[in-house]
Image: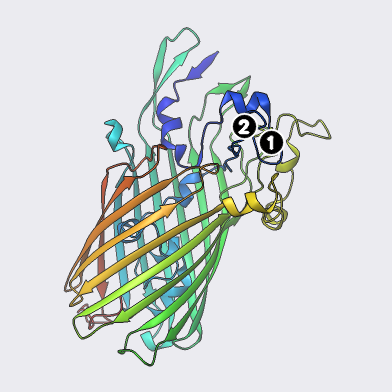
């Protein structure tokens, strides 16, 4: 029987997975605590298609992955498509390249992202259509048989295509957006596990988003507080095998706020905060793989038998250790951005995830340069925990173009 050398594959998708220690599995958990050590039990929420939650934008990547309420650009669809209705440019286009696992010396694993939006009618109508494409290449993996005899190589890959419509419901104040998307994942098609053929997985999903802008009259024009929210990846469950045991895709609730202060004609800054939570069931206590909690003995763990919609509502109260564990499932991002003369930006941020829920903790920093219709953003990530990050010490960049209506000339600098 064939098997696949998946070391690269496992490393590439480890963004949302943490290995649970054998001691914890053996001892089990009681109210979220290891009865032997007294430590909090690791109980990470894992999903299929985790690449859908990878932040593709170097600007946000430099600000601790915030993006829900910061000013709009062509990468906004990943976070909150509704804010595109307030874009000051008629057309925006972006391209981002993110090396993956570069710290391990791997050169053929990367994320590429393209985004674009266009206003419908005059910009003052505040309604836009937008599209994006995400492509995740997992490089090349070796395929061997049970005797480790090479059988060739394969190139697993994943992609997402999305389209969105956004419009202001209250001019200059409140907008809403709807995104529809299709995601495809081909990790090891044509191979077999326990006699079952591995096949590509695909899903159809939707995002719902909103944005509210509240000007601060006591400060310089352009100063405001923005609130945003989005429920993303509301969609079908998927499986890579011919089986009823399907996995949830990473449905996520994100809420964000940003304060932008215009100091004077040349200087302004933004401080932003995002809070995210996966709307996916938490694995049962002491049974992270769901092999024990199967009341009807149909081979499908009980927590995986909920519909996608039911799982969204149950995810707020299903943590085995109760409310304290639910609080651990929130991910926090804080970021800051300073612009000089709308031409040069300096950014920094911090991302925090609880140690029992993934343990991703990292500092970020980056720069932005704007010249005419051209924007270039850079970001760099520095881990602050012992949990390795696929973007450890990696430089990534985004290229953006913004065009005025009809002429292709740049508009006066907006509040980006």
Asked if one can make out residue 377 in the rendered structure from this viewpoint, the answer is: no
Would you identify the image quadrant in which residue 131 lies?
bottom left
Q: Disc 2 marks which residue?
A: 241
Can you name the residue that lies furthest to the bottom here? 217
* Front residue of 42 and 213: 42
Position of 235 with respect to 19 (left or right) is right
Q: Kindly check if marks 2 and 1 are in contact, taking CB atoms under 8 A apart as contact.
A: yes
* Front residue of 174 and 227: 227
If the image is split into quadrants, where does the C terminus sit? bottom left
Position of 72 with respect to 198 (left or right) is left
Query: What SS does tag 1 mark?
Result: loop
Asked if one can make out residue 205 in the rendered structure from this viewpoint, the answer is: yes
Residue at 44% across, 10% down: 148
If the image is split into quadrants, where does the N terminus sit? top right
Q: Is residue 43 above or below residue 81?
A: above
Position of 224 with respect to 95 (left or right) is right
Spatial separation of the CA atoms under disc 2 and disc 1: 8 Å
* Front residue of 60 and 365: 365
Q: Disc 1 marks which residue?
A: 245
Query: What SS does tag 2 mark?
Result: loop
Q: Give the percent coordinates (x, y) of residue 63.
A: 34, 60
Q: Give the percent coordinates (x, y) of residue 344.
A: 18, 69
Residues packed near mark 2 inside 10 Å, few (<14), some (14 to 19) or many (20 plus):
some
Residue at 58% across, 34% down: 240
Q: Is residue 399 above or below residue 391?
A: below
Q: Is residue 237 above or below residue 345?
A: above
Q: Give the percent coordinates (x, y) of residue 386.
A: 40, 37
Would you identify the image quadrant in which residue 223 lies?
bottom left
Residues packed near mark 1 inside 10 Å, few (<14), some (14 to 19) or many (20 plus):
some
* Front residue of 339 and 148: 339
Q: Give the percent coordinates (x, y) of residue 285.
A: 69, 37
């Amino acid at each position: 029987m064939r098997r696949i050398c998946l070391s690269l594959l496992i490393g590439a998708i480890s963004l949302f997975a943490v290995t649970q220690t054998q001691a914890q599995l053996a001892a089990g958990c009681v109210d979220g605590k290891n009865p032997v050590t007294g430590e909090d039990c690791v109980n990470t929420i894992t999903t299929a298609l985790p690449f859908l939650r990878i932040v593709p934008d170097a600007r946000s990547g430099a600000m601790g992955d915030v993006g829900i309420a910061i000013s709009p650009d062509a990468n906004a669809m990943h976070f909150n498509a509704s804010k595109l209705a307030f874009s000051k440019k008629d057309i925006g286009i972006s391209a981002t390249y993110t090396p993956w696992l570069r710290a391990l010396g791997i050169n053929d694993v990367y994320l590429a992202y393209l985004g674009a939006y266009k206003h419908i009618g005059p910009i003052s109508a505040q309604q836009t259509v937008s599209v994006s494409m995400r492509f995740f290449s997992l490089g090349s993996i070796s395929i061997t048989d049970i005797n480790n005899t090479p059988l060739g190589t394969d190139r697993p890959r994943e992609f997402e295509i999305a389209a969105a419509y956004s419009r202001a419901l209250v001019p200059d104040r409140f907008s809403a957006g709807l995104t529809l998307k299709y995601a495809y994942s081909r990790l090891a098609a044509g191979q077999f596990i326990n006699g079952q053929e591995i096949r590509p997985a695909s899903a159809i999903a939707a995002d719902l988003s909103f944005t509210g802008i509240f000007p601060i009259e006591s400060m310089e024009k352009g100063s405001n507080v923005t609130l945003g929210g989005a429920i993303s990846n509301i969609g079908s469950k998927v499986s890579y095998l011919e089986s009823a045991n399907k996995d949830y895709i990473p449905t996520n609730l994100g809420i964000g706020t940003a304060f932008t202060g215009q100091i004077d004609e040349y200087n302004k800054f933004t401080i932003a905060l995002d809070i995210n939570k996966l709307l996916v069931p938490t694995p049962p206590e002491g049974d992270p793989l769901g092999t024990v909690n199967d009341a009807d003995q149909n081979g499908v763990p009980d927590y995986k038998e909920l519909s996608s919609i039911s799982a969204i509502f149950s995810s707020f109260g299903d943590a085995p250790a109760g409310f304290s564990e639910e609080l651990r499932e929130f991910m926090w991002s804080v970021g800051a951005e300073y612009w000089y003369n709308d031409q040069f930006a300096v950014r920094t941020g911090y991302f925090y995830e609880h140690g029992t829920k993934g343990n991703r903790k990292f500092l970020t920093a980056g720069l932005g340069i704007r010249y005419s219709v051209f924007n270039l953003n850079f970001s760099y990530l520095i881990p602050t925990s012992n949990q390795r990050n696929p973007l450890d010490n990696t430089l990534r960049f985004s290229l953006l173009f913004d065009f005025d209506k009809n002429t292709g000339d740049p508009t006066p600098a907006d509040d980006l």
